Image: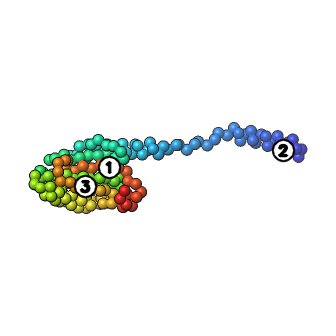
Amino acid sequence: MPPYRFFLIASLLLGFAACVPPPPSAPVIDAAALKQQAEAQFAAEVATLPGAEPLAVSGKTVAAVAYPPGSLFAEGAILPLPGGPALLDPLSAILARPEWCAELALYGTRGGSVEDDQSFVEGRKMLLERYLLRGKVDANRFTWTAKGGAGAPLEIRFHPCSAASSAGVKE
């Protein structure tokens, strides 16, 4: 076989290979945009919790709500109002999601001493904690603050869980 034929065949094959279109590229997934979309969807869902009012968010907080006086507890009562489960079950379902952590703050006063108010709020905290844990909420993913004094009976601030907080390590 003369050498020019080999060169001619090789050139033709390379020419044909160059005409083949490249395979389609994989779509580029923007992780930051997906995270933003998930956070916005979660914040919209949290804002529709029954009985809760949305709060302003800042920092790592993605969503925040407060249950105003008279929506969850009667004034001076530790037990929730008769419609309490209708308010707490949707909250429990959101708190059960493993990708979200929360800071729950309880406030309340009975009009007595500071110690009485603190004991009163601690009672509400124990009751809510038991109720939420019964709903399969992982207690390692949220923190509680109970303070006697004026304020919404329950405020909740949600943020994405880090690997450490998901493992039960407090940040």
Quadrant assignment, res 15: top right
The quadrant the C terminus occupies is bottom left
Q: Position of residue 2 (x, y in %)?
A: 89, 44
Callout 2 environment at 10 Å: few (<14), some (14 to 19), or many (20+)? few
Amino acid carrying mark 2 in the image: Phe
Q: Which mark is residue 6?
A: 2
Three-letter residue code for mark 1: Phe
- Identify which residue is drawn at 48% across, 43% down: 30
**Circle 1 — which element?**
strand
Q: Which residue is mark 1?
A: 158
Helix, strand or loop for disc 2: helix
Give residue 90's mark.
none
The residue identified by callout 3 is 145
Q: Nearer the viewer, residue 52 or 107?
A: 107
Mark 3 or mark 2, which has the lower sequence index?
2
CA gap between label 3 and label 1 equals 14 Å
Q: Residues within 10 Å of mark 3 (few under 14, many from 20)?
A: some
Residue 4 visible in the snapshot: yes
SS class, disc 3: strand
Q: What residue is at 11 percent from the left and 50 percent from the top?
A: 75
Name the amino acid type tagged 3.
Thr
Q: Quadrant of residue 33?
A: top left
Q: Is residue 74 left or right of residue 27?
A: left
Q: Earlier in the sequence, mark 3 or mark 1?
A: 3
Say which of marks 3 and 2 sits in front: 3
